[in-house]
Image (tube, rainbow, N blue to C red):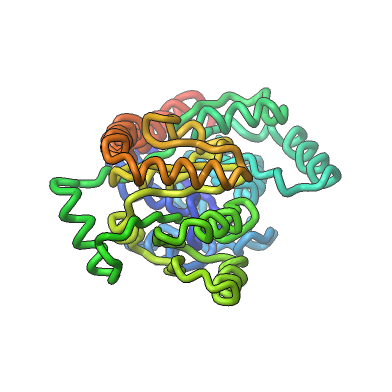
């Protein structure tokens, strides 16, 4: 049995923590997982339901030397074979612990998030990654476009890597039409209204101000903004002050599928992505996707086949594309059918978990010196 320590500096709502949760939920008997993460909601509790007490707490997005020592001790006590870090903060923990414990480190970046950095911050970060890349044994990119962006930024060029596409749970959809009508009734939305959802954090990267502008110009449609973040209250106030009444701010939810099932299309306005779980979850329930033409989005969405991509910032194009799928039922049905097929054949959590665990086993075989 391979023992794997997952490290994440976040356990709040987000794609990285959800990715980890799906790995734990769908794990095989050949792999035993341990987790080092903050006591954030909801994933600390969700991880507990899956792996019990095989966890240790670290701070939320903060480095603690005492916690590094505690995790090292935890790793040795449990005779863990492999470390798997998720995201930049966890990557630092993983590198230090891998070095002192002499355990191989697998790292998943979950997106090359440097678009918000100024030139100095970007230079410092890239220098840090270059100087510490020798501590990483394998990198898992969650999409081909994420790998291409890493190459473009000259990140970890000397580190062995593998692309394992992000995956989501396949939905059981015996009667999609009835499920949608029932979901709309459940959240009290007129079943005759066309509903567009966005599952997102409200921050710079997710660019929800652009989604707001699209919604403001599409008054005949209802928009479900699912999630939370620093900009949520700002946008709610803006909607109130400007009289934009067709946006429903749901807040965070442990069951986003009920909102996705109540929707007819999905909108992503992100400035960048790794491989967007929200888009994949939308595809799993047959939603055509309108997405910004950026890393991650433009790989998940096949333009004209499962939805459409538009140039970031081109709100008029996004509105036009959205209108086209509302007005053309044959187009809508084709996009919906292809969305489900693409998700199940390429972005299934079962495929993702199997490939990840195969990588663990290979990594263990290649590093039998401990």
Q: Is residue 61 above or below residue 273?
A: below
| Residue shown at the point (48%, 43%) measured from the top left | 320
Figure quadrant of residue 347: top left
On screen, residue 32 versus residue 100, left or right, reads left
Coordinates of residue 236 in the picture (x, y in percent)? 55, 72
- Taking the image as shown, residue 120 lies to the left or right of residue 179, namely right
Residue at (29% x, 58% y) in the render = 262
Query: Which quadrant does the N terminus fall into?
Result: top left
300 or 155: nearer the viewer: 300
In this picture, residue 213 sits left or right of residue 116: left
Q: Name the residue: 81% across, 47% down.
A: 118
Q: Nearer the viewer, residue 140 or 307?
A: 307
**Residue 101 in sight from this viewpoint:** no
Residue 335, x across and y down, in percent: 32, 35
> In front: 359, or 148?
148
Question: Is residue 352 shown left or right of residue 330?
Answer: right
Image location (x, y in percent) of residue 133 = 69, 33
Q: Position of residue 136 (x, y in %)?
A: 62, 34
Give the residue displayed 59% in from the left and 72% down from the top: 242
Figure check: 289 above or below 212: above
Q: Quadrant of residue 323?
A: top left
């Amino acid at each position: 049995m391979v023992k794997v320590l997952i490290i994440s500096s976040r356990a709040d709502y987000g794609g990285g923590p959800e990715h980890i949760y799906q790995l734990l939920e769908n794990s095989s008997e050949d792999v035993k997982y341990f987790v080092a993460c903050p006591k954030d909601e909801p994933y600390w509790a969700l991880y507990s339901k899956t792996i019990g007490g095989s966890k240790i707490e670290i701070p939320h997005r903060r480095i603690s030397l005492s916690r590094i020592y505690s995790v090292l001790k935890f790793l040795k006590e449990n005779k863990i074979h492999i470390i798997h870090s998720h995201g930049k903060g966890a990557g630092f923990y993983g590198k230090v612990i891998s070095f002192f414990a002499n355990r191989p480190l697998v790292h998943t970046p979950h997106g090359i998030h440097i678009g918000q950095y100024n030139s100095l911050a970007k230079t410092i970060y890239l220098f840090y990654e270059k100087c510490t890349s020798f501590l990483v044994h394998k990198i898992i990119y969650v999409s081909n476009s994420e790998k291409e962006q890493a190459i473009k930024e000259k990140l970890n060029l000397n580190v062995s890597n593998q692309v394992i596409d992000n995956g989501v749970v396949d939905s059981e959809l015996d009667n999609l039409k009835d499920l949608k009508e029932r979901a709309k009734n459940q959240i009290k939305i007129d079943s005759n209204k066309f509903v567009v959802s966005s599952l997102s954090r409200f921050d710079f990267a997710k660019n929800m101000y652009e989604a707001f502008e699209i919604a403001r110009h599409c008054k005949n449609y209802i928009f479900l903004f699912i999630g939370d973040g620093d900009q949520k209250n700002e946008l709610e106030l803006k909607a109130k002050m400007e009289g934009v009444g067709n946006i429903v701010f749901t807040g965070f939810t442990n069951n986003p599928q009920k909102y996705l099932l109540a929707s007819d299309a999905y909108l992503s306005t992100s400035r960048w992505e790794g491989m967007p779980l929200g888009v994949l979850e939308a595809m799993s329930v047959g939603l055509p996707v309108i997405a910004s033409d950026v890393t991650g989005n433009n790989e998940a969405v096949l333009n004209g086949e499962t939805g459409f991509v538009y140039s970031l910032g081109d709100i008029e194009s996004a509105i036009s594309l959205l209108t086209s799928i509302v007005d053309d039922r044959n187009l809508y049905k084709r996009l919906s059918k292809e969305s489900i097929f693409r998700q199940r054949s390429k972005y299934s959590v079962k495929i993702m978990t199997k490939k990840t665990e195969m990588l663990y086993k290979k990594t263990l075989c290649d590093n039998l010196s401990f």
